Amino acid sequence: MTPATDTQIDLFTWARDLERENKRVADINAERSRRRGYLVFATDPSKDVDSAEYQQVYATEARTPNQAVAKIRPLAEGRRLRAFLTTGKYRDELADARWVA
């Protein structure tokens, strides 16, 4: 039996492809680490706490909590805004949150 030589891997091409893929993954991970997911709670102090309109929940990506709040502020005028990481204690709220790009 003779091995098929035309099916051998070119190690130099493989190494170049592997380096490109590693760089691509590193770039993606760096971008993800700069943006984190935030839940922003917008509460209306003029509404009753038991009212459905008292609290709205928004989800967004930003670098800081302040940037997340700044994205939501035009949508929730007159409301108090608080931002929390989506991986924190309020992560269950993410399913019902309104996404803001």
Image (cartoon, rainbow, N blue to C red):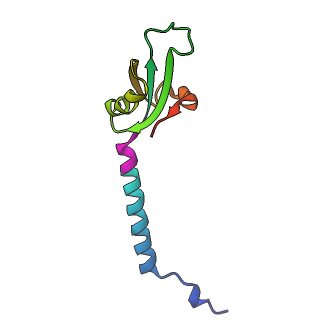
Residue at 46 percent across and 36 percent down: it is 100
| Residue closest to the far right | 1
Question: Residue 91 appears at what percent x and percent y?
Answer: 51, 28
Question: Residue 17 appears at what percent x and percent y?
Answer: 44, 72
Place residue 92 in its image quadrant.
top right
Queried whether the magenta region covers residue 32, the answer comes back as yes
Question: Residue 14 appears at what percent x and percent y?
Answer: 46, 75
- Left or right: 93 in relation to 29: right
Residue at 53 percent across and 16 percent down: it is 53
- The segment highlighted magenta reads 31-37
Residue at 56 percent across and 8 percent down: it is 50
Question: Residue 11 appears at what percent x and percent y?
Answer: 45, 79
Vertical side of 71 occupied by 53: above or below: above
- In terms of depth relative to the viewer, which is nearer, 78 or 25? 78
- In terms of depth relative to the viewer, which is nearer, 79 or 65? 79
Place residue 12 in its image quadrant.
bottom left
Vertical side of 33 occupied by 26: above or below: below
Image quadrant in which the N terminus is located: bottom right
Queried whether the magenta region covers residue 61, the answer comes back as no
- In terms of depth relative to the viewer, which is nearer, 3 or 34? 34
Image quadrant in which the C terminus is located: top left
Vertical side of 67 occupied by 18: above or below: below
